[in-house]
Image (tube, rainbow, N blue to C red):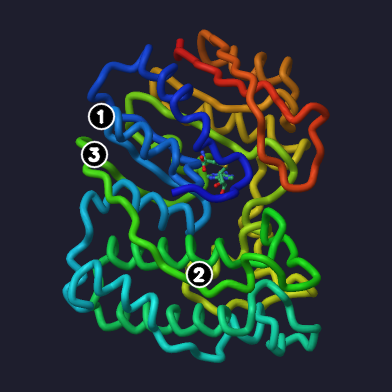
C-alpha cells in the first residue's frame, strides 16, 4: 500500500531499515511515533522488530492498526468474512449526506459556498453510504477495533484513488477529471504476519516520548511549513467518522489545535529539544531533509546535546506537491544519536 503523502518514506524504507539494523539487534523494540502511512513501521516489523507506531492524527493510526495489528484477514463475523466485507464495501448503498453536500460535485455546503469538487457526486454519496454503514457496525459492536480500522483503511485508500486533487486535500481541482470520474472501488489488501508484538497509539510525540519504553525510536517529523492536519482533512474526517464544520471554500475541518510545532521555523527547534529530552531510548534515528525548518548546523548542535551523532545520507528524488526542486533530487538524511 502506498499513496501520495508528504514525506512518505515508502521508497526509502530499505535504506532506513538497513541503517537501523546495523545498530539495533534483531528482536529489539522500536517506536515510530510519527508514523504517517506506517510504511516505516511495517518495514521495521518485517525484519523482526516489535514496533510501537503512533501519530498525532487519527488516519495514520488507522493505517498502523491495519498494517501492524491485522496480521491475517480479520474474521468479520458480522459481514460473513473478509471477502464479504470487501463485497459489502463495493456495494453499500449511496446516501446524500455530509460528504455529498460538503465535498461532492452536486453538493450544497452548509456555509453557502459553491460546491466543492473533491469528488464526483456519485463517489461522494458512496463514501457517505459506507461511512454510515461503518458507523452502524461500530455502534452495534459488530466489528472490533482492528476490523473497524481495516474498513476505514480500505475507505481511505479507495477515496485517495478518486479524489479530484493535485497532491494533497488543501484544495480541489477546478474541474472533475481523470481518476475522479472513475467509480470508487475496493481491492483486497495483503495482510502481513510479522513476528513482533506491536502496539499502536495516538498522541503528539512531545507527550508520548517519555512513555514509549522501546530500545530505539525512529522520528520522521514534518520538515516543511505544510501542516498535515489541514492538508489531509478529508482523510482525518473519514478516520474520525464525524461531521465537523467544513470551513471556507476548501471545507477544512477545524485543524489548528492539531497544528504541529515541527512545521514552524519559530518552534521546530524547540519541538526537537522537547521530544529528545523526554525520550529514554539508547538509540534515536531521525529522518530530516537538508532543507527542513531547522537548518543543518542548528539540528546538529541540538542533537549533539543528547548523544553521539552519526549522519547517513542518500540522494533521492522526492515527491513535492507544489514546490519545485531544482534538479528533482534531494539529499535524504538519517541521523543516529547514541544517547550519552
Ligand atoms: C513526514 S510524515 C511521516 C511519514 C511516514 N514516515 C511515512 O512514511 O508515511 C510526518 C508525520 O508526523 C505527524 N506529526 C506531525 N507533528 C507531530 C507531533 N508533534 N507528534 C506526533 N506526530 C506528528 C504527521 O501527522 C505526519 O503523519
Which label number is shown at residue 48?
1
Q: Residues within 10 Å of mark 1 (few under 14, many from 20)?
A: some
Pinpoint residue 337: horizontal percent, then vertical percent: 50, 15
Crowd band around label 2 with a 10 angstrom C-alpha radius: few (<14), some (14–19), many (20+): many
| Closer to us: 279 or 100 | 100
Specify the quarter for ligand 1: top right
Given residues 267 and 186, the one toward you in this image is 186
Mark 3, mark 2: which one is toward the viewer?
3
Q: Are marks 1 and 3 in contact (CB under 8 Å)?
A: yes
Identify the residue at image location x=64%, y=59%.
257
Q: Residues within 10 Å of mark 3 (few under 14, many from 20)?
A: many
Q: Is residue 300 above or below residue 149?
A: above
**Front in this rendered view, residue 329 or 291:** 329
Q: Measured from the top left, where is residue 251 in percent x and y?
A: 71, 73
Q: Is residue 56 above or below residue 27?
A: below
* In this rendering, position of residue 274 left or right of residue 13: right
User: Residue 194: which numbered mark, if any?
Assistant: 3
Residue at which label 2 appears: 238
User: First in sequence: mark 1 or mark 3?
Assistant: 1
Q: Secondary structure at mark 1?
A: loop
Mark 2 and mark 1: Cα distance apart in space: 31 Å
Whole-percent x and y of residue 321? 73, 47
Q: Are marks 2 and 1 in contact (CB under 8 Å)?
A: no
| N-terminal-most mark, 3 or 2 | 3
Ranked by sequence position, the earlier of labels 2 and 1 is: 1
Asked whether 201 or 27 is in front, the reply is 27
Residue 221, by quadrant, is top right
Residue for point 28% across, 73% down: 85
Q: Is mark 1 within 8 Å of ligand 1?
A: no
Amino acid at each position: 500500500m502506498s499513496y501520495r503523502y508528504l514525506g512518505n518514506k515508502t521508497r526509502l524504507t530499505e535504506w532506513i531499515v538497513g541503517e537501523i539494523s546495523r545498530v539495533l539487534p534483531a528482536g529489539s523494540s522500536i517506536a515510530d511515533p510519527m508514523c504517517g502511512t506506517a510504511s516505516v513501521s511495517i518495514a521495521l516489523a518485517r525484519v523482526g522488530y516489535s514496533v510501537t507506531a503512533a501519530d498525532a492524527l487519527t488516519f495514520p493510526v488507522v493505517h498502523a492498526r491495519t498494517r501492524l495489528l491485522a496480521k491475517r484477514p480479520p474474521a468479520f463475523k458480522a459481514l460473513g468474512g473478509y471477502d464479504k466485507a470487501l463485497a459489502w464495501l463495493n456495494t453499500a448503498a449511496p446516501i446524500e449526506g455530509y460528504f455529498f453536500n460538503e465535498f461532492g460535485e452536486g453538493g450544497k455546503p452548509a456555509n453557502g459556498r459553491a460546491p466543492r469538487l473533491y469528488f464526483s457526486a456519485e463517489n461522494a454519496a458512496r463514501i457517505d453510504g459506507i461511512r454510515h454503514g461503518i458507523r452502524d457496525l461500530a455502534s452495534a459492536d459488530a466489528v472490533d477495533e482492528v476490523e473497524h480500522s481495516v474498513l476505514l483503511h480500505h475507505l481511505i485508500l479507495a477515496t485517495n484513488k478518486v479524489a479530484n486533487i493535485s497532491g494533497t486535500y488543501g484544495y480541489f481541482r477546478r474541474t472533475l477529471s481523470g481518476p475522479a470520474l472513475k467509480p470508487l472501488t475496493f481491492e483486497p489488501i495483503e495482510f502481513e504476519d510479522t513476528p513482533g508484538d506491536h502496539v499502536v497509539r495516538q498522541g503528539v510525540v512531545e507527550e508520548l516520548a517519555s512513555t514509549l519504553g522501546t530500545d530505539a525510536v525512529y522520528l520522521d517529523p514534518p520538515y516543511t511549513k505544510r501542516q498535515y492536519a489541514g492538508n489531509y482533512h478529508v482523510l482525518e474526517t473519514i478516520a474520525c467518522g464525524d461531521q465537523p464544520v467544513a470551513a471556507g471554500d476548501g471545507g477544512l475541518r477545524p485543524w489548528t489545535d492539531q497544528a504541529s510545532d515541527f512545521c514552524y521555523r519559530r518552534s521546530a527547534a524547540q519541538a526537537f529539544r522537547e521530544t529528545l529530552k523526554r525520550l529514554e531510548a539508547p538509540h534515536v534515528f531521525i529522518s530530516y531533509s537538508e532543507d527542513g525548518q531547522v537548518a543543518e548546523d542548528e539540528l546538529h548542535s541540538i542533537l549533539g546535546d543528547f548523544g553521539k551523532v552519526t549522519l547517513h545520507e542518500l540522494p533521492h528524488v522526492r515527491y513535492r506537491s507544489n514546490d519545485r526542486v531544482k534538479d528533482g533530487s534531494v539529499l535524504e538524511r538519517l541521523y543516529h544519536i547514541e544517547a550519552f
